Each structure stands twice: as C-alpha cells, then as structure tokens.
Image (cartoon, rainbow, N blue to C red):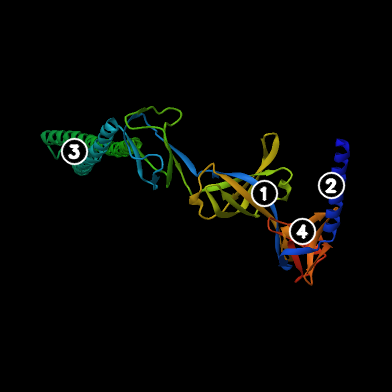
C-alpha cells in the first residue's frame, strides 16, 4: 500500500512539472529597462594597484655636522617648516669664542700692518733723501778733487822752473790728498746710502707680502670659524612637513662619518604613484598615457595623472611578476601621503564616436553575444559583434544601429 501511494505522488509531481514547463514556454518576454543605442566613447583600461611614494629628492634627512649637546629643538612630527626655518641649536659656546678670536686676529692684522707699512714707507723716503744728499756730496767732492789736482799739477810745474816755493807745492800736495780722501768717503757714502735704500725697499716689499699673506690666512680662519659656528644652527634646507624626529633637546650628538640625523622633511607636493602592472599587461602601457586613481582615504575623489616612467626591472610579489609604472602630474597632491594604496586605471586607448550600449545590455548565450532588441514593444534576441569594453559601456561593431532600443533586462508574462 505504501509503495502504491509513493508511486502516485511521483506521478503527480511529474505531471505538475510538465504543465509548468508548457506554461513557461508560452510566456512572452517583456522589457524591464530600455535604453537607446547611441554613439559615445569606450576606453581600453588596465586595472592595477599601486602605492604613493616620494619622488627622488622629495624627502631629505637633516643632520648635524658638529658634535655637541642639543640645547634647542623647535619642531615636532607633523609641523610644516619653510626653507630657512630654525630646526635646532647645538651648544656653540666654544665655537663662539673661536669666532671672536678669529675676528680679533683679523682686525689686529688690518690695524697693525698698515701702520708698519706706513712707517716703512717713511724710511724708504728717508733713504732716498739720504742717497740724493750723498750723490750731491759726491759731485761736490769730485769737483773739489779736480780743482785740487789742477792746483797741485800747477805748483809742480812752477816748482820745476823756480816760480814757486816748496812750501806752496807741499800745501797743494796736502790739499790734493785731502780732496782724494774726501772723494773716497763721498763714494762710500753713496754706496752706503744706495745699500740702505735697497734694504728699506726690500723690507717694505716683504711687509706688504706678509700683510697680504697673513690677511688672507686670517680671513680664511675667520670664514672657517663662521662656518663651524653656523653648523651649530640647524636650518630647514627646503619647505615641507616634518615626517620624522630622531634627536631631542638635551641629547648629545657626535659627528662622524655619517652626520647625526635630526629630522626628516617631506615635500608633500613632490609625490608620485608607483603602479604595479602585471607582466601580461605591461606591453600595453606607454609613456604619456592618462592614469586615473583613487585612494581609500578619499573614495569619491579621482586623481588624474600621466605615465612618466616604466621601470625595466621587475618586482616579484607572491610569485607574480609586476613592473612599476610611475605616474605624476596629479592635482590636489597635498591630500596624499606616502605609502597610501592606490586603485588605478591606466587608459591604454580611447575610441570615440562608436556605437555603444551599457554592459548590462550584452549577454553571452550559446557561444556568442546577443542583445534584447525592442521592436514595436516586443523583445527580439539579436546576435551582435562587440569591440572594446570598459567598466560602463561595450562597443557594438555589428548587429545594431544608432537609435535602436535594447533592453537591459527582461521578464516573462
């Protein structure tokens, strides 16, 4: 009895299924949402994930070039600094004293050497005057010697013929000897005066050279002292945001081969987007292609830039080969931060003025694409040939014309 009832139930279910199928085959398809086939544009897009990175030179580590205790630090993480702002000060008391000594030494050289050179110039002029006096005296003694020699020769001649006395001859001889002695002395005086002049001129030349040498050295020492003193003040080399602080007030820094790091400054406007493109897609990417991307912090904000670089060296992540595509030139870059994840669309091509329909209108059925064309209020299944497609539209190459109506979805009645 139980087996008989079970067989009746199965037969009843089969009969109900046959009736339902026959009823469905008789239902008519009705369009739910209808759109018009129009001309538009469709883009070839490459989707990839990326990361915001600082450009080369956009992040600078600021350090110290001297050793000492930090006596002042004016910044903290997140502060914005302008180029030239004071970041920190290192104890500079010894450097300040060295600077004072160097400046005093330079001032002393500038004061003392001109005085010494002026005195030496006076001595040179005096030596020139003495030389002129010695030369005048020599000229007078040469004239006196000529006269005394003539008188001696005259007395000698007169004595030989008896027209003078031996006493007068003797007087003339003594006068000639005195004139000769005076002439020799005058010559020696000129020689001594000339020697003295050359010595004074040599000393003047030496003083001038020594002045220039010591002045140059003192100026160099002062400049070095100023530079070393300036090292105690740490200034911002560029404008940006303090992204890292490693040294605090009261700590002692020791300058060695590597300058101790105080802070890191980031220029928030010099960022770039590193897009990790799969090796299967990298051949489609070219420099200059537009890039659109979003970040999780601003999901409704679309940033636009261009491809500026394609790194030749691959990056392997989870055994998948990627290539880094660098995009720059996007606006509102100050909203971004390094290491933010980006969701990118690289626009590899755009076809404008082509027939397009929403992606939902195209169906894959029995190995080819079809659309539900609406004709006279009725739905007709039409095969189509498609071209490019993006996240919104699909290009229709064959099967439809501009102005045709197609259904995005249908129902049965």
Q: Which residue is mark 2?
A: 13
Q: Are marks 2 and 3 in contact (CB under 8 Å)?
A: no
The residue located at (36%, 45%) in the rendering is: 85
How far apart are labels 2 and 3 at the CA level?
178 Å
Of residues 222 and 382, the one nearer the viewer is 382
Q: Which residue is mark 3?
A: 152
User: Which element type, helix, strand or loop, lies under badge 4?
Assistant: loop
How far apart are labels 4 and 3 at the CA level?
147 Å
Report whether 355 appears left or right of 101.
right
How far apart are labels 4 and 1 at the CA level?
22 Å
Does the rendering let one see residue 194?
A: no
For residue 47, the mark is 1
| Quarter where residue 162 is shown | top left
Instruction: Name the N-terminal-most of marks 4 and 2.
Output: 2
The residue located at (36%, 32%) in the rendering is: 248
Q: Which residue is mark 4?
A: 362
Q: Are marks 4 and 3 in contact (CB under 8 Å)?
A: no
Residue 367 vertical placement versus 230 (above, below) = below
Of residues 204 and 22, the one nearer the viewer is 22
Q: Decide: few, some or many residues near mark 1? Use Cα within 10 Å; few <14, some 14-19, many ≥20.
A: some
Q: Quarter of the image containing the N terminus?
A: top right
Report whether 303 appears left or right of 413.
left
- Please name which of the two marks, 1 or 3, marks the residue nearer to the observer: 1
């Amino acid at each position: 009895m139980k087996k008989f009832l079970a067989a009746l139930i199965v037969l009843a279910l089969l009969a109900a299924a046959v009736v339902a199928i026959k009823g469905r085959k008789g239902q008519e398809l009705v369009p739910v949402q209808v759109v018009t086939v129009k001309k538009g544009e469709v883009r070839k897009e490459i989707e990839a994930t990326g990361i915001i990175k600082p450009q080369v030179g956009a992040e600078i580590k600021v350090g110290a070039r001297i050793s000492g205790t930090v006596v002042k630090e004016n910044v903290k993480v997140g502060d914005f600094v302008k180029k030239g702002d004071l970041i920190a000060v290192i104890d500079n008391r010894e450097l300040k004293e060295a600077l004072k000594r160097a400046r005093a030494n330079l001032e002393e050289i500038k004061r003392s050497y001109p005085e010494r050179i002026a005195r030496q110039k006076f001595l040179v002029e005096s030596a020139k005057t003495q030389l002129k006096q010695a030369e005048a005296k020599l000229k007078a003694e040469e004239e006196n010697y000529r006269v005394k020699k003539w008188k001696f020769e005259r007395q000698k001649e007169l004595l030989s013929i008896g027209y003078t006395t031996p006493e007068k001859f003797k007087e003339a001889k003594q006068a000639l000897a005195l004139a000769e002695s005076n002439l020799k002395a005058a010559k020696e005086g000129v020689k001594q005066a000339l020697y003295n002049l050359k010595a004074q001129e040599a000393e003047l030349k030496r003083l001038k050279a020594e002045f220039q040498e010591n002045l140059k050295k003192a100026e160099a020492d002062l400049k070095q002292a100023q530079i070393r003193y300036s090292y105690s003040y740490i200034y911002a080399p560029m404008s940006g945001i303090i992204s890292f602080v490693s040294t605090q007030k009261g700590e002692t820094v020791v300058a060695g081969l590597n300058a101790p790091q105080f802070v890191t400054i980031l220029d928030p406007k010099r960022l770039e987007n590193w897009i990790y493109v799969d090796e299967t897609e990298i051949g489609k990417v070219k420099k200059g292609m537009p890039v659109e991307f979003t970040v999780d912090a601003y999901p409704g904000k679309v940033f636009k830039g261009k491809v500026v670089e394609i790194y030749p060296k691959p990056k392997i992540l989870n055994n998948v080969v990627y290539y880094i595509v660098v995009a720059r030139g996007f606006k509102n870059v100050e909203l971004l931060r390094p290491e933010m994840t980006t969701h990118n669309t690289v626009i590899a091509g755009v076809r404008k003025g082509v027939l397009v329909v929403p992606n939902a209108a195209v169906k894959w059925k029995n190995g080819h694409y079809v659309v539900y064309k609406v004709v006279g209020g009725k739905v007709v299944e039409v095969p189509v040939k498609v071209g490019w497609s993006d996240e919104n539209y699909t290009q229709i190459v064959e099967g439809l014309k501009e102005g045709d109506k197609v259904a995005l979805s249908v129902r049965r009645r």
